[in-house]
Image: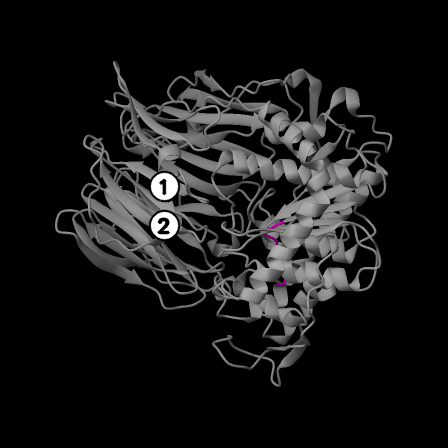
Amino acid sequence: MSTEPIAQRVKQTVKLGNVSGDRGKNLMDPPVELTDHYYWLRSDKRDDKKVLSYLKSENDYTESVMNSHKLHVDNMFNEIKSHIKETDQTYPRPKRSWNSEYRYFTRTIEGKSYPIYCRTNSTTEEILIDVNVMAEGKTNYDLTSFIVTNDHKLMSYGIDESGNEKYKLVIQSIDTKETIPHNIPDLMYCSYFWYKDYIFYEMGDETNRMFQVWVYNLNNKENRLLFENSNALESVSVSMSNDETHFFISSSSYDSSETYYFTKDNFNPVIFSPKKEGVLYEVTYHQGRFLIITNADNCRNFKIMQCDNVNTSSENWSEFITYDKTMYIEDIHELKDYLLVVYKKSGTNKIKAIKIVNGEYDFNNAYDIELDLESSIPPNIDLICVDIYDTNKIWFSHESLDTPVTLYEWNLNDKSYKTLFVKSVPNFNREHYQSERIFAKSHDGTMVPMSIVYKKNLFNKNSSNPLYLYGYGSYGCTIDPNFSSKILPLLNRGFVYVIAHVRGSSFLGYEWYEAGKMETKINTFKDFIACAEHLISKGYTFRKGITIEGRSAGGLLIGACMTMRPDLFHTVIGGVPFVDVLTTMSDPSIPLTTEEWEQWGNPNQEKFYILMKEYSPYDNIRPTTYPHVLMLAGLNDPRVAYWEPAKFVAKLRFHRTDKNLLLLKTEMDEGHFGGSDRYKYIKQMAFSYVFVLKTYNLLVKI
């Protein structure tokens, strides 16, 4: 198909406000009406023949445009692979003890798409699961949440063959490989864990909101409902303390939370402390007391409090560690004789160790784990959770944009450490690359950090380098500046690669996240635009020299910036992009919508309708010249429906005044994250890179 598909325009009215369905409170009345000519592309069951035919025509057109570059894609595929050690394995992990009978790891084999799960003891090595065998003949296959029981006798995992993230749980005997029948239903996202002969798991409702916690007894094959939450704004999760004595059910929205707890001797949840609006808290148990991470008392970067195991309501909490607003507390990890505090400070991940001496925490001698590395950027220290409670050794890792991941073992008693494992990256010399951190001034004067990497001998800082700018900026999720061999083909062609740590992430703390959500969401997009302009002004690239990429909510970021400033960017790569914000967020029947009203706002309310209409990419397409665009979708995606990028491309194609490339590629048997076939993933990346190079006229003739 050599001509662009032209989607039929069918006028349809979409109403926001006081209309059918549970759309919240304070609704617009009368409702606001939007005209949507491409609403017909929505097929909830993914079975509308007209819609499927249109998506196929878009795929055919994309293939025809890129058909002459098949050799380029093949070469790029091989180039990306050349920086990956295809036959490799992870560092073996013990189970519950450093003297564990077995250590577990995964192996990959050159030419094989999927991992092989293995274990080893002092004499033999054993293959537990070869996913390559299981996935044979399947167009999509995802095996996740692989767990071995503490006694090393059983293994369990989830399987999804459609990409809709509903997993069938499999339990097997390791010795016999016999599959053990059970009565656990399919699990959304496959969230579960073992405790002895019990499996605790979460269930999703029809909108994929996690609303129930269950426990399954392996012996009598009975399921028991422990907790249910009917509030559409909230979701639930279940966890266990590291000493395996206490269990916690968190029932939370984005702004408020409530916890229930029970013990290993009594599976009857009781409330820990009643919910208070605007207060988040999570709980664990350590050495006879509860420890609470909370933003109570306006401690927006969170503090740690404590209480005894009897009087647990918030009025009985006392300060555990003095609140430091420069520390964003992310987690605490309990060991028998230590408490580890995981936090972020000035964009750097850190771990603080606190020893227990004579039953008390020795705060005076608490210390941060430090690495002596030559770098202008403080090193990220990331805790690797090995499920060993009684230990004075921990594992942590370090990596950066120009340094592959290294695994360390740290002795908590004497502060010594040793290197366990360094990720091997073929055809890579760290000395040839340079990373930096710089800041851009945003619209309101806020300084926005960026992490940068480039190849030294190809970087001129004279406005001659093309630049690849990546961003996300939502849910408080931070894209840390970690190493990726997959960007080396870009760096080796002179691209500068940049991650913009915009507000909406938590790169500079929870306050940084709050400054890019709800009423302040516009900051996320203006930060990204400011980063792009700063990179041009400082000579890192040239005007119209920037490619931008974002996935999911990051796709909203690049879609919004593209429609706000179409003059600023050269090429846009949108992966499963959330671009139809108003229509999606107004419709409670769409999965994950209602609980995210505390993330984006509810556009059925006038205030948020006005705010979201300012940046919703689909609603801001207008007649003008746009960058080159490649939109990627998954037909079975349960998080961002395929019709969002499909509608976006159709509307963009109708309104644009240019002849730049505009392509839509929909994977017809995949979901939000694509397949877990590593070679297919690399092929998709190669395709995107060749598209980018084509738009810059940087493809070498073959």
Q: Residues within 10 Å of mark 2 (few under 14, many from 20)?
A: many
Quarter of the image for residue 120 reads top left
Residue at position x 48%, y 23% in the image: 110
Quarter of the image for residue 646 reads bottom right
- Of callouts 2 and 1, the N-terminal one: 1
Quarter of the image for residue 186 reads bottom left
Give x and y (percent) for residue 510.
Answer: 56, 48
Q: Nearer the viewer, residue 250 or 465?
A: 465
Q: Which residue is mark 1?
A: 145
Q: Is residue 646 left or right of residue 590?
A: right
Give x and y (percent) for residue 56.
Answer: 60, 56
Q: Is residue 643 visible?
A: no
Q: Which residues are magenta?
A: 575-580
Residue 46 to residue 417: above or below: below
Q: Residues within 10 Å of mark 1 (few under 14, many from 20)?
A: some
The amino acid marked with disc number 1 is Ser
Q: Which residue is mark 2?
A: 167
Q: Look at the image and tell me in which quarter the C terminus lies.
A: top right
Give x and y (percent) for residue 119.
Answer: 30, 24
Give x and y (percent) for residue 136.
Answer: 39, 37
Residue at position x 69%, y 40% in the image: 449
SS assignment for the magenta stretch, majority: loop
Q: Nearer the viewer, residue 370 or 188?
A: 188
The amino acid marked with disc number 2 is Tyr
Residue at position x 60%, y 70% in the image: 40
